[in-house]
Amino acid sequence: MYTLKKSLGQHFLHDEQMCQKIVGQLTLQPGLKLLEVGPGGGALTKYLLKKEDTDFKAIEFDEEKVNYLIKTYPELNDKIIHIDFLKAEVPFPGHFSIIGNFPYNISTQILFKVLEWETQVDEVIGMFQKEVAQRVASKEGNKTYGILSVLIQAFFKVEYLFDVHENCFTPPPKVKSGVIRLTNTQNPYQIEQPRRFLKMVKTAFGQRRKTLRNALKPLLSPEQLADEIFNLRAEQLSVPDFVKLYNTYFNHA
């Protein structure tokens, strides 16, 4: 068997119906390349391995879980990448999808990693702490709307799929959980310099109670900041508004 490690944010799904429901959200296509992040005890893995015509890999950091998985599912022997996901290289050439019951203590960093791989990631089916899932799906004007909402929605369609009850886990987490789907929208806003866009959005939300004029002061000249849009706060701008701001003031050499 294996032990749970609180330091790695481990809560394992034991509800078989819920495992199947999550796996059932995947968009299957011939020759699908699929990466599972944090398979743990294999709750989702055992169903993912049954998918035909799928090139499957899993990334697991915990050596004890790696050994357990290979022993329990021998077909995983050459499919597990034993590394910290945040330090991983792109696992496939070309396009692939990601699925996982993501460790809650690094879920935000996982999403930033997905953004790094955005040009190759077609779909993400992910279970997160409900608060994080809602933040990703949130629209402008909400308190939960922030950096992650804007950055993910600029490149992916976000769907909040369903809640997952605490009793589906061992041990039950103290927080609610939710499953979301991210579908790549092929950079619809034609953002040429994602890193620059990221810096702008992070800076804009850095002082969310202040106007954009105050928040973006380090990045723009007083003349530029005279525009009326800078009277607003970051949470009032939609994703297209942020793109317009980026194109007007930041998308240059």
Image: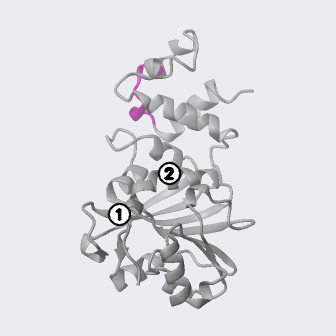
Give the CA distance from mark 2 to mark 1: 18 Å
Q: Main secondary structure of the magenta part?
A: helix
Magenta residue span: 230-237
Q: Is residue 48 visible?
A: no
Q: Nearer the viewer, residue 2 or 198?
A: 2
Please name the residue that numbered disc 2 is placed on. 109
Tag shown at residue 6: 1
Element carrying mark 1:
helix
Element carrying mark 2:
helix
Q: Is residue 234 magenta?
A: yes
Please state the horizontal and vertical placement of residue 41, each as a whole percent of the image: 44, 79
Q: Is residue 185 left or right of residue 180?
A: right
Q: In this figure, what is the number of numbered marks?
A: 2
Please state the horizontal and vertical placement of residue 57, each as a whole percent of the image: 62, 75
Q: Nearer the viewer, residue 44 or 209?
A: 44
Q: Residue at x 36, y 85 (%)?
A: 16
Q: Residue at x 64, y 27 (%)?
A: 250
